[in-house]
Image: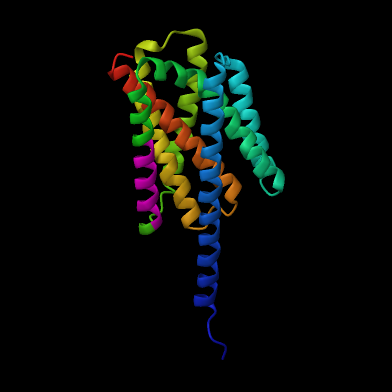
Amino acid sequence: MAEPLGPIVDAGRAIEVNKVLRSTYLLLAMAIGFAATTAFVGIAMGLPFMGFWPYLIGFFGLSWAVNKTANSSWGILLTFVFTGFIGFAIAPILNVYLQVNPGVVLQSLGMTALAFVGLSIYTVFTRTNFSWLGQFLTVAFFVILGIIVASIFFDLSAFSLLISGLMVFVACALILYQTSRIVLGGETNYVIAANNLFVSIYILFMNLLSIFGIMGDD
């Protein structure tokens, strides 16, 4: 009678998961580095604010393009186009904060890095299944979409701290959910995984920047 192949299959799956995890973090690190470079170039050039609609079209358009081409080398190229676009988009915002209070930017960067590393280490080493967060994130997506639409017609600045707090919570939930999918084999495409984590880190950083700025009266 043939021996069960379970352990061999499990070992092969573990190797594949580790490969996806390494490739994801490598691409993520390069994407963050490229976004930081384009942001500093944008600051040096004194780029003006992009505007709501160009930003929105660029963000969702490039995100869609990355996911559409994720199985080819075009996916990697478009990853850098997308992250470079984000870098240029946030350059004017960072420039304002750097002129008013540079410490807020450093504080936000430090907290973002600490939160991402901590959440990632916990998920990778405990292999906790955070798939249950999927329903919450679906609801959160529609809530955020509603906030974006409402901001077009109404001044929501009085609720900035509350909205930014919600976004920080959602970003942390996204990191847990996405890392869990990679670790447990639910996400096998490292291009999609890296881009999803990049967006989560971007959301986390920008909203921490907003919170620290508000709390510091900046």
Identified at 62% across, 18% down, the residue is 54
Residue stretch in magenta: 112-124
Within the image, what quadrant is residue 82 found in?
top right
> x%, y% of residue 52?
56, 15
> x%, y% of residue 37?
54, 32
Left or right: residue 217 versus residue 129 is left
Identified at 48% across, 14% down, the residue is 150
The furthest residue to the bottom: 1
> x%, y% of residue 99?
40, 15
| Camera-nearest residue between 133 and 48 | 48
Q: In the rendered view of the protein, which quadrant contains the C terminus?
A: top left
Coloring applied to the structure: rainbow
Identified at 41% across, 32% down, the residue is 204
In this rendering, the count of numbered labels is: 0
Residue 113 belongs to magenta span: yes
Residue 132 belongs to magenta span: no
| Camera-nearest residue between 153 and 215 | 215
User: Is 118 rendered above or below residue 146?
Assistant: below
